[in-house]
Image (cartoon, rainbow, N blue to C red):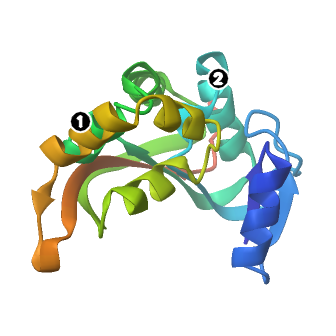
Amino acid sequence: VVGIDVEDTTIKSAMHNAPLAEFRTGSASQLPFPDQVFDAAIFVNSLHHIDSLSMERALSEAGRVLKFGGHLIVIEPLPEGSFFEAFRSIEDETAVRLEGQSAIRRFTRPDLRHEKNIEFLRIETFGDFDAFISRTTAADKSRLSTVEQNREPIRQAFEENSTRGKHGSYVFEQPFKVDIWTRFRRIDARI
């Protein structure tokens, strides 16, 4: 398993959480690997964080490093659901999530076949508002300043969009979409 991210701090955190995996700092649109070395390439909640002009390039790069028969899997949150609505009070990702889905629809590569897409609902549960803030700012600490400046409106969005679960927990729904491609050998049609 090899993980890649543009941020050194993210890499350090990942190394701590998964010490047996390999991690590299780098860009998804210019992967530091040779052709055809991986069985799978997976984007988890990350395509929409890539510059919109580089999204399709990143998908193509992932296809390049796949072995024949390998799978490209893209798991992206959709801009809907109660978790999204609460999170939008901190950072509105509507445009970037829509652009990610648009890039997925536009993406083609002659040696990749789109196999299917699957939608699923992830349930997020938090014991309290502070746990929600901790989770939503973990990947981007700059969001903490937004929270400090807008704590009460964010708390209100948190309360309004949640349902109450067991033991008083706050429950949210986040729809996701998974797209899966398979790399295949192209047959040269020249006669």
Viewer-closest of 136 and 56: 136
Check contact, mark 2 vs mark 1: CB within 8 A: no
Q: Secondary structure at mark 1?
A: loop
Q: Amino acid at mark 2?
A: Asp
Residue 4, x across and y down, in percent: 76, 53
- Count residues near mark 1 (Cα–Cα under 10 Å), then give few for <14, some for 14-19, many for 20+: some
Q: Amino acid at mark 1?
A: Glu
Q: Is residue 23 above or below residue 100?
A: below
Q: Which residue is mark 1?
A: 80
- Count residues near mark 2 (Cα–Cα under 10 Å), then give few for <14, some for 14-19, many for 20+: some
- Count all numbered tags in the image, as a single digit: 2
Which residue sits at x=44%, y=30%?
A: 91
Q: Secondary structure at mark 2?
A: loop
Which residue sits at x=33%, y=56%?
A: 129
Say if residue 143 shows up in the picture: yes
Q: Mark number for residue 59?
A: none
N-term mark: 2 or 1: 2
Residue 76, x across and y down, in percent: 42, 44
Tell whether 140 sits left or right of 118.
Answer: right
Q: Which residue is mark 2?
A: 51
Residue 148, x across and y down, in percent: 51, 36
Viewer-closest of 97 and 129: 129
Q: Is residue 40 above or below residue 86?
A: below
Tell whether 21 sits left or right of 138.
Answer: right
Residue 81, x across and y down, in percent: 20, 42
Tell whether 13 sits left or right of 75.
Answer: right
Image quarter where the N terminus lies is bottom right
